[in-house]
Amino acid sequence: MKKQISSETDIILVGAGIMSATLGSFLKELDPTLKVQIFERLNQCGLESSDSWNNAGTGHAANCEMNYTPELKDGSIDIHEALEVNTEFDISRQFWSYLVKEGKIQNPQDFIHSCPHMSFVQGADSVAFLKKRFEKMSASHCYHGMEYTESHEEIAKWTPLITDGRDPNEPIAMTRMITGADVDYGALTRILIGALEESENFTLSYQQEVIDIARDSNGRWLVTVKDTVLKETKVISSKFVFVGAGGRAIELLQKSGIPEGKGYGGFPVSGIWLRSDEASIVDQHHAKVYSKAAKGSPPMSVPHLDTRIIGGNKSLLFGPYAGFSTKFLKHGSYADLFKSVKPGNILPMLDVAKDNMGLVEYLIGQVLQTSHHQFAALQSFYPQALKENWREVVAGQRVQIIKPDKPEKEGILEFGTELVSSSDESLVVLLGASPGASTAAFIALNVLQKSFKEQLSDGWEAKLKEMIPTFGIDLKVDADACRATRESTAKTLGLEFI
């Protein structure tokens, strides 16, 4: 049966999180005449993975996250992925700086603060690993200024909570990048959405759930939207659709019917934090301190003790403790995982289950952990921690990608983010989790380059270079450009520069 179209638009963005807010901001800066619509099923923007308390706000620059720098079988350290993420964050810094200069962001300190990023390890083997990692990373201009120490006294100066009460003979080591940041992606999402709402030809509709995406005979996309309050549905025709709906992206990719999406599935991982607002503790720790991940654990569960600055108030978060839920979103349904299983992805999902029993066992172990065990993990970071100063808070859901990988294997578990597009790039679906929010601007650039090639060659590229001055420059290679952009964006955003 032919669908009755209620309206037409140029762009539909599904989900009002940091991804849609960022891509929408790019598009409206490049062409203010574009008709852009965002549909969000909740009653406010940025309430899922972008929410301030649902992510660590690391400002992922791959400074401290050791899962980006694996040790290879020959004992060498691979920093390839770290360099990619590190310079992708520079794209975000440039975009935010542009918006500050344009008056779209009034005060950068509403969402970003300078905060050192540190890696911390315990035990002789891990100390040896961190030293090798430091030597490899500090040799790159991208990690100019990285410091390393095995001295308890020096670590006490950097992060007193880490050494207070610790055995002075315990082998420990730490690296520090004072150029790191804490980013409140919930606040940033609201800032970007607020600026968009002041522009022409833009609408954002809350409590509107996208329930279907289908292609019409003219090549346009018919997006069916349900009003969750009035229970009414409507169909909007659009030239281009971006799905940045977090855990719901898998379902909408499947409903679109594009061959490129066949075989994709998702594996949900939940998280729990311990949080302290006790000033006497919080004031002693100004850093994001990451340790090594447990064997078999997903990247989002790498233990870390984080300074968070949200709404002008400073807190500490420790965790996250990974868990398992069949929900794909924090505000989702326990049926999400089961509904995502389709004939086309059963084999990839079974293949991943077979090859990732270590992850399954790890998650079961996390779920069965007592509060005593959880607190013991915090005390390995902060030996003098007292239970009465910490409370448990639930973090957001993440959905790791199960990706078809023929002919070698049926499926693989992917821990990053990935764009899945229709053959003509008019439908783009973002899957995955970390480092997501921190690289939203880089992801938006990828979408623009794939889906708006004509517009880029017809005049957008000049404007894009105004927004992202290093567009087309490889910052991993060009040390002068890397240093220049970091100096400029640090000044605009109020960050440290060395």
Image (tube, rainbow, N blue to C red):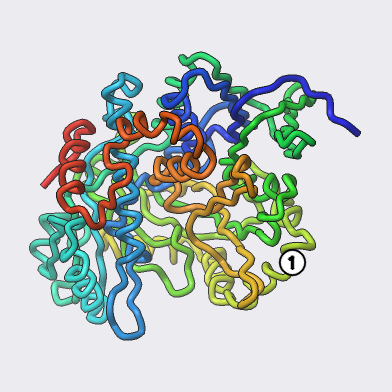
Q: Position of residue 350 (x, y in %)?
A: 69, 72
Mark 1 = which residue?
Answer: 346
Residue at figure coordinates x 57%, y 21% from the top left: 35
Q: Position of residue 385 (x, y in %)?
A: 29, 57
- Going by the image, does 442 lie left or right of 148? right
Q: Position of residue 285 (x, y in %)?
A: 22, 49
Q: Position of residue 425 (x, y in %)?
A: 59, 44
* Residue 229 visible in image: yes
For label 1, the crowd category at 10 Å Cα-Cα, with few meaning under 14, some 14 to 19 and many 20 or more, is some
- Going by the image, does 223 lie left or right of 435? right
Disc 1 is placed on an element classified as helix
Image height of 221 relative to 65, above or below: above
- Going by the image, does 239 lie left or right of 150? right
Residue at figure coordinates x 44%, y 66% from the top left: 373
Image height of 52 relative to 69, above or below: above
| Nearer-the-camera pick, 26 or 376 | 26
| Nearer-the-camera pick, 88 or 225 | 88
| Nearer-the-camera pick, 79 or 248 | 79
Residue at figure coordinates x 47%, y 16% from the top left: 199
Image height of 95 relative to 69, above or below: above
| Nearer-the-camera pick, 283 or 104 | 104
